Each structure stands twice: as structure tokens, then as C-alpha cells.
Amino acid sequence: MSRWGVALVLTCGALVLASCGGDSGPKVELSEYTVSVTPESVDSGETTFAVENVGGETHEFVVVKTDLDSADLPTTDDGSVDEEGSGIEAVDEIEDITDGSSADLTVDLETGSYVLFCNVVDDSVVHYQEGMHTSFTVE
């Protein structure tokens, strides 16, 4: 094989490996008091969220399917989200993500609207009420 043939094979191989890369799911950063996700939408099917707590407090990562605005989820008496409340469908969650740690959450998502949030109540500080929520779309 000529050196051009070898170069072509190596280039094509690198492109195939890059396109199959394993950590192409949404990246989520949790901190006081925000949830940021990139990208803000994915195609339906199995999705792995790579969640990192970059804040100084323990947080959690909750995924619910809903047509409600992220700030309008049903709440309990203490102000935390009622995860079994009207208008939301609980998908899954990761509890107790300590500061500086990370975790992955793999879920099978259908087309629709979702909200990602932290539902920790710590010393009467309700993380959801402090703005720790964001919308997410599955196409």
C-alpha cells in the first residue's frame, strides 16, 4: 500500500473513532443555585447525563417529564418539588452528589419537554426555590 493509502486509512479510522465517542451525552453542572446543561436538547432514546457538582454544597439531579415551565412545578409545604405531583412524570434521579464529585445517569427519554432540577432542602434553603432548575427538550 502506498503512503497515501496508509494516510487515507489512518484518517478514516480516526474519523470513525471520533464519531463513535462515548461521552457525547449532555453535560450537566450543578452549583449554588443553578443547573446548566449543554446541549439543551437531544434526540429521543437512551441518553447519558454526565453530572458534575462544581458547587460547594451537596446537590441532587432530578429528571421529570412535564409540559410545565421549570419554575412552575408542583411543590410540597416546604417548597421542594412534589416529585409525584400533578403534571409531572418522574424519570430518574441521582441523590447526594457531594461537592467536587460527578456521576452519570442513563435514561431512556421519549420526545417531549423535561425539567432538570435539584430538590435538596438544606437548613430551610430550598434549592429548587433558589433557582436550581432548567428546561430540557427531547426531539
Image (cartoon, grey):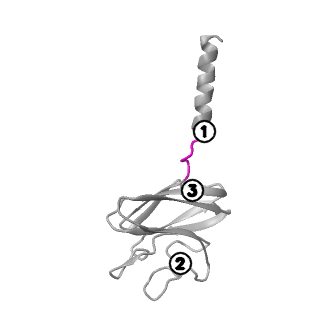
- Counting residues from the N terminus, which is met first, the one under dot 2 or under dot 3? 3
> Disc 2, disc 3: CB below 8 Å?
no
Residue 63 shows in the view: no
95 sits left or right of 136 in the view: left
Q: Mark 1 points at which residue?
A: 19
| Residue labelled with disc 3 | 48
Amino acid bearing label 3: Thr
* Magenta-highlighted residues: 21-25
- Comparing labels 1 and 2, the label whose residue is closer to the camera: 1
Query: Magenta-highlighted stretch: main secondary structure?
Result: loop
- Cα separation, mark 1 vs mark 3, equals 16 Å
Q: Where is residue 99 in the image (x, y as percent from the top left)?
A: 35, 63
Say what secondary structure mark 3 lies in.
Answer: strand
| Amino acid type at image mark 1 | Ser
**Callout 1 touching callout 2 (CB < 8 Å):** no
Asked whether the beta carbons under mark 1 and mark 3 sit within 8 Å of each other, the answer is: no
Disc 1 is placed on an element classified as helix
Q: How crowded is mark 1: few (under 14 residues within 10 Å), some or many (20 or more)?
A: few
Q: In this view, does 135 lie above or below 13?
A: below
Q: If you read the primary sequence from the N terminus, does the residue marked by circle 1 or circle 3 appear first?
A: 1
Q: Which amino acid does label 2 sit on?
A: Leu
Dot 2 alpha-carbon crowd within 10 angstroms: few under 14, some 14 to 19, many 20 or more: many
Give the alpha-carbon distance from disc 1 to disc 2, as whole Å.
37 Å
Q: Where is residue 4 in the image (x, y as percent from the top left)?
A: 61, 14
Point out the image quarter for the C terminus: bottom right
Q: Name the residue under label 2.
A: 73
Q: In the displayed image of the protein, which residue is found farthest to the top?
A: 2
Q: Give the total number of marks visible in the rendering.
A: 3
